Image (cartoon, rainbow, N blue to C red):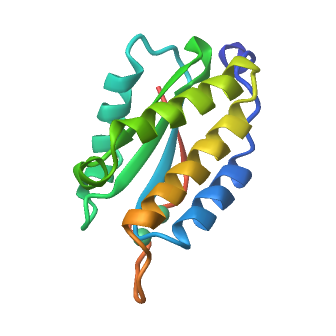
């Protein structure tokens, strides 16, 4: 389909591996949503998919969704209440700035992996993984509209 021709190539396996690695150290759950279309309001889109993908239903309220819309060159990172309680705005601003640098260079995959790694570090500091942790949500990349 021609529509997809301009989308950057994203190695889903690499992203899944990055999520799995991050979740080795935290009880938090990370997912990535990759939009096929442009998003006029990435934060609203992120919130919508966050709920739809079940990220708002983790036991410790520590889900994080990284939503990326390459066609409009924007993105948003949406964390649940537990995450925001523990982590200040400064972290999110720094994360967004770093990811923006990658995306500006067209390095979408590297930018997403960076976001996963940094979000994983943050989650690990506040929500360390404990014995018997379960993988509440699949470590996947969702293609969304
Ligand atoms: Ca988990
Ligand atoms: Ca998971």
Query: Compared to 125, does 89 lie above or below?
Result: above
Residue 33 screen position, x and y as percent: 50, 38
Query: Compared to 69, does 95 lie above or below?
Result: below
**At 23% from the left edge and 51% from the top edge, which residue is drawn?**
85
Question: In the picture, residue 79 is in which quadrant?
Answer: top left
Tally of marks: 0
Left or right: residue 58 compared with residue 7: left
Residue 137 visible from this viewpoint: no
Residue 133 screen position, x and y as percent: 40, 81
In the rendered image, which quarter contains the N terminus?
top right
Query: Compared to 91, does 22 lie above or below?
Result: below
Residue 102 screen position, x and y as percent: 70, 28
**At 56% from the left edge and 12% from the top edge, which residue is drawn?**
72
**At 44% from the left edge and 41% from the top edge, which residue is drawn?**
91
Q: Residue furthest bottom?
A: 131
Left or right: residue 13 compared with residue 58: right
Left or right: residue 47 compared with residue 141: left
**At 72% from the left edge and 14% from the top edge, which residue is drawn?**
2
Residue 116 screen position, x and y as percent: 57, 49
Q: Nearer the viewer, residue 102 or 20?
A: 102
Residue 23 visible from this viewpoint: yes
């Amino acid at each position: 389909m021609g529509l997809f021709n301009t989308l950057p190539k994203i190695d889903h396996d690499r992203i899944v591996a990055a999520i799995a690695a991050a979740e080795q150290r935290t009880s938090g759950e990370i997912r990535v949503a990759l939009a096929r279309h442009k998003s006029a309001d990435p934060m609203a889109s992120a919130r919508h998919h966050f709920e739809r993908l079940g990220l708002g239903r983790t036991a410790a309220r520590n889900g994080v969704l990284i939503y990326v819309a390459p066609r409009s060159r924007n993105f948003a990172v949406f964390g649940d209440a537990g995450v925001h309680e523990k982590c200040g705005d400064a972290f999110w601003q720094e994360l967004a700035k770093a990811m923006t640098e990658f995306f500006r260079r067209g390095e979408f995959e590297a930018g997403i992996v960076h976001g996963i790694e940094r979000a994983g570090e943050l989650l690990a500091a506040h929500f360390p993984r404990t014995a018997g942790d379960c993988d509440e949500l699949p470590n996947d990349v969702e293609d969304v509209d």
